Image (cartoon, rainbow, N blue to C red):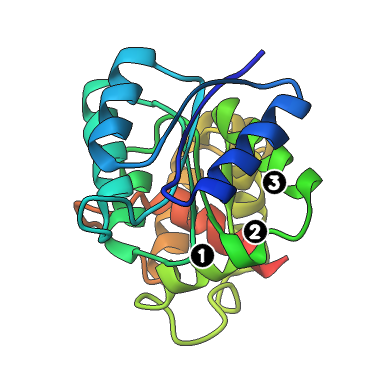
Amino acid sequence: MNRVLIAEDLYLLRDGLVHLLQAHGFTVVAAVESGPELLKGLLELRPDVSIVDVRLPPTFTDEGLQASLAARTQVPGLPVLVLSQHVEQLYARELLADGSGGIGYLLKDRVFNAEQFIDAVRRVAAGGTAMDPEVIAKLLARNARHEPLAALTPREREVLEAMAGGRSNAAISQRLYLSESAVAKHTASIFAKLGLAPSDDDNRRVLAVLAYLNSR
């Protein structure tokens, strides 16, 4: 049974999330309404997944993401599902940067049914990724002004598809009957064609997979 922490300042939405999650078998260990309460709860309770609004008291700017990032520096891989009306690109990239643990970023007005939301919560709790396509598009906007996958060769698309399945370079090598050095070259070419230059705040493998999933 997954243990969930909710951080949402609007009472009706917070209470609704509590009842929805409990109805689907989750245990809500805390439901808080501010950034400081969120950080304290994440560090003390170590939930299986947290559902976090970006803008929380006291300043209603980015307390939710800041608290989540601070908690993940102390508890690497702590699963976080951001549920917000806004896309904060810098902090979303920071959440993706270490590539560890479950991460999700959904926009409130684009969650259309309970099943979609609960599936996202479960994926993040299990260490997976749940990203709204609009969030993905904004994350990739600075890197691509055209269809990001159009320039890939058929072999590079196969490598990227295997990458999206969670396979390592060694596993891709076995699957596609390529040497690991060839897979590494294809991977480097994919990153280059998608405009994913090395940086401190981007996990290129994650962003490449997100680009693939967004194109399907």
Q: Are marks 2 and 1 in contact (CB under 8 Å)?
A: yes
Q: Earlier in the sequence, mark 2 or mark 1?
A: 1
Residue 112, image x, y percentages: 75, 60
User: What residue lies at 21% left-to-right and 51% top-to-bottom?
Assistant: 58
User: What residue lies at 35% left-to-right and 49% top-to-bottom?
Assistant: 203
Residue at which label 3 appears: 117
The amino acid type, in three-letter code, at marker 3 is Phe
- Mark 2 or 1: in front is 1
Q: Earlier in the sequence, mark 1 or mark 3?
A: 3
Q: Earlier in the sequence, mark 2 or mark 3?
A: 3
User: What residue lies at 48% left-to-right and 65% top-to-bottom?
Assistant: 85
Residue 185 is left or right of residue 168, and the answer is: left
The amino acid type, in three-letter code, at marker 2 is Leu
Residue at which label 2 appears: 213
Residue 149: quarter of image = bottom right
Q: Are marks 2 and 3 in contact (CB under 8 Å)?
A: no
Residue 111, image x, y percentages: 68, 59
